[in-house]
Amino acid sequence: MAQVICYGCNEEINEKNESAEHIINNSIGGHLKSKKLICKTCNNKFGNTIDAELEQQIGMFTGLLGITKDRETNSHDYRLTTADGEVTRVGKKMKPLNKLKFKLPDREVLLFATDENYEKLKNRKQKELDQHFKTEFKETIEPPDKKIYYIGNKLTDEIGHIAFGGKPYFQSIAKMCLNYYLFKGHNIKYCKEIIQFINGEDKAGIVDYFYPSNQSIHLLGEKEITHLIQIIGDSKNKVLFAYIELFSMQNLIVKFEMNYGGPEILDTYCYSPIDGQEIEKPIRVRLTKSHLQDLNIISDSGIHRHTEKYNRMLKIIESRQLED
């Protein structure tokens, strides 16, 4: 059996330290995984740092779209905010959560629960109150309203504008592309700089947004939401890079090698996290070395397309909420 080395720390992966690494992060609905990428220690390290950052920025869309994760890690409890700062709490598909209100001698307590957890929480809290405070509680359900709520993340500003990015966020995205590249059995010798970047070294220009204003990468169905990774090894232009889409909304290029001397590569993974199905599409992202070097200019010129894609996703979230 060939030796398998963890790309995070260069230690050999064996039965004692192996760990199932999701190619696309579990927090955003990724199911494909491998035990031949990183060791348990590195998996935990990345999970608690760069992957946690990505979850804090876009992980809420997993719950709001009603996506089932491979491994559940939270209760799908999300905060939405109005323009005037009012906050509501919702669960999957933006369904308002049930409220449980009760008064203690020194304060009022308000808890939230999904339909499936509400009775259990109510009975447990009633028992606690009977034992410790001899007090009563009132239960209510948060009604839907016609106010406009903004989906926020840790970068949302005071007027509700959402943002994405930062080095740890881009490190997590680069890791997903590297995972898929190695999962497909390609040579790790072309991955030196991307591995250094994932491990925290400053490597300018490894990851850039990509929203070309003059082309459409692929056609989307009316309510299609997909994650997509394409690895391109172009021996003619001597470049190795990846194109990645998350929630059909975050579109980025990840550069592996700008003096590539390996074989031609065109591997594509397109996955619907809502349906749990892989999708085959005729996709080919064609970028030369000069395109990749000027990617920040290309991205800036088409940034309005990110807004279009983001608003499209919000409409799909809303439509899926109404289906309930």
Image (cartoon, rainbow, N blue to C red):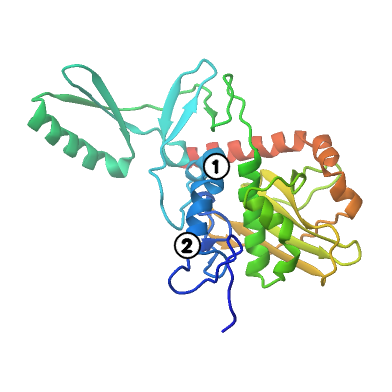
Which numbered disc, 2 or 1, marks the residue that appears first in the sequence?
2
Quadrant assignment for the C terminus:
top left
- What is the x, y in percent for residue 287? 86, 54
Q: Which residue is mark 2?
A: 40
Task: Provide the secondary structure element on which disc 2 rests.
Answer: helix
Q: Choose mark 2 or mark 1, whichever is in front.
A: 2
Q: Residues within 10 Å of mark 1 (few under 14, many from 20)?
A: many
Whether residue 233 is visible = yes
Q: Is residue 261 left or right of residue 1?
A: right
Quadrant assignment for the N terminus:
bottom right
Q: Residues within 10 Å of mark 2 (few under 14, many from 20)?
A: some
- What is the x, y in percent for residue 186? 71, 71
Q: Residue at x 40, y 32 (%)?
A: 96
Q: Which mark is residue 53?
A: 1
Closer to the camera in the image, 104 or 148:
104
Residue type beneath disc 1: Glu
Residue type beneath disc 2: Lys
- Quarter occupied by residue 126: top left
- What is the x, y in percent for residue 89? 41, 30
- Quarter occupied by residue 319: top right
Residue 76 vertical placement versus 18 (above, below): above
Q: Is residue 177 left or right of residue 140?
A: right
